[in-house]
Image: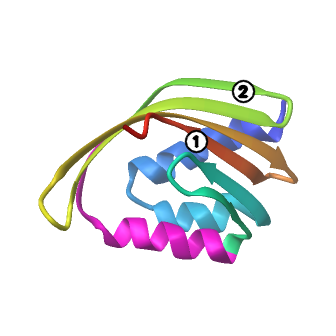
């Protein structure tokens, strides 16, 4: 069984429980590159922790996280999810996205998100 087969489910449980920053430290490699339509590439764990902390700080309340579709392969995992939250300005945010992770040594070395930006 591939390491991503087990760890992706652990990662999703961290996110469901609001442990986003813990998940970053536990599941992401020091040399991780994260790619998002809104930001482009962010290289390195330290830079991604900083970016992710800004996101967490912008959230007033998480309302929902669902990952109904999860697929795993040799060193790769993919999940489709829906997230809802209220930001610090009381705006309700709804995001539907797909995330693709590439794993090495039990850690994510690359993650790419696909979502509409308009």
Secondary element at image label 2: strand
**Image-based side of 66 in relation to 78, left or right:** left
> How many marks on residues?
2
State the image coordinates of residue 71 (x, y, percent, origin top left).
Answer: 66, 23
Residue 100 visible within the image = yes
In the displayed structure, 97 sits above or below 30; it is above
Position in image of residue 42 (x %, y %): 66, 63
Chief secondary structure of the magenta portion? helix
Q: Is 94 colored magenta in this rendering?
A: no
Q: Please name the colour scheme applied to the rendered image.
A: rainbow
* Residue 46, disc: none
Q: Secondary structure at mark 1?
A: strand
Is residue 20 toward the left or the right of residue 58 in the image?
right
Q: Which quarter of the image is occupied by the N terminus?
A: top right
Residue bearing the label numbered 2: 72
Q: Classify residue 43 as left or right of residue 67.
A: right
The span shown in magenta is 46-64
Foreground mark, 1 or 2? Answer: 1
**Which residue does the image show at 65% across and 51% down from the upper left?**
35
Q: Residue 75 lies in what quarter of the image?
A: top right
Quarter of the rendering occupied by the C terminus = top left
What residue sits 70% from the left and 38% below the top? 6
Among numbered discs 1 and 2, the one appearing first in the sequence? 2
Q: Disc 1 marks which residue?
A: 113
Residue 78 x, y percent position in the rendering: 64, 31
Name the quadrant containing residue 18. Answer: bottom left
């Amino acid at each position: 069984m591939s390491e991503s087969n087990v760890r992706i489910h652990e990662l999703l449980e961290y996110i469901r429980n609001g442990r986003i920053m813990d998940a970053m430290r536990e599941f992401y490699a020091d040399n991780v590159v994260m790619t998002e339509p809104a930001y482009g590439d962010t290289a390195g764990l330290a830079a991604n922790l900083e970016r992710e902390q800004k996101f967490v700080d912008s959230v007033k309340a998480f309302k929902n996280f669902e990952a109904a579709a999860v697929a795993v392969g040799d060193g790769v995992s993919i999940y489709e999810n829906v997230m809802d939250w209220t930001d610090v300005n009381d705006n309700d945010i709804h995001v539907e996205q797909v995330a693709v992770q590439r794993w090495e040594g039990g850690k994510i070395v690359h993650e790419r998100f696909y979502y509409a930006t308009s």
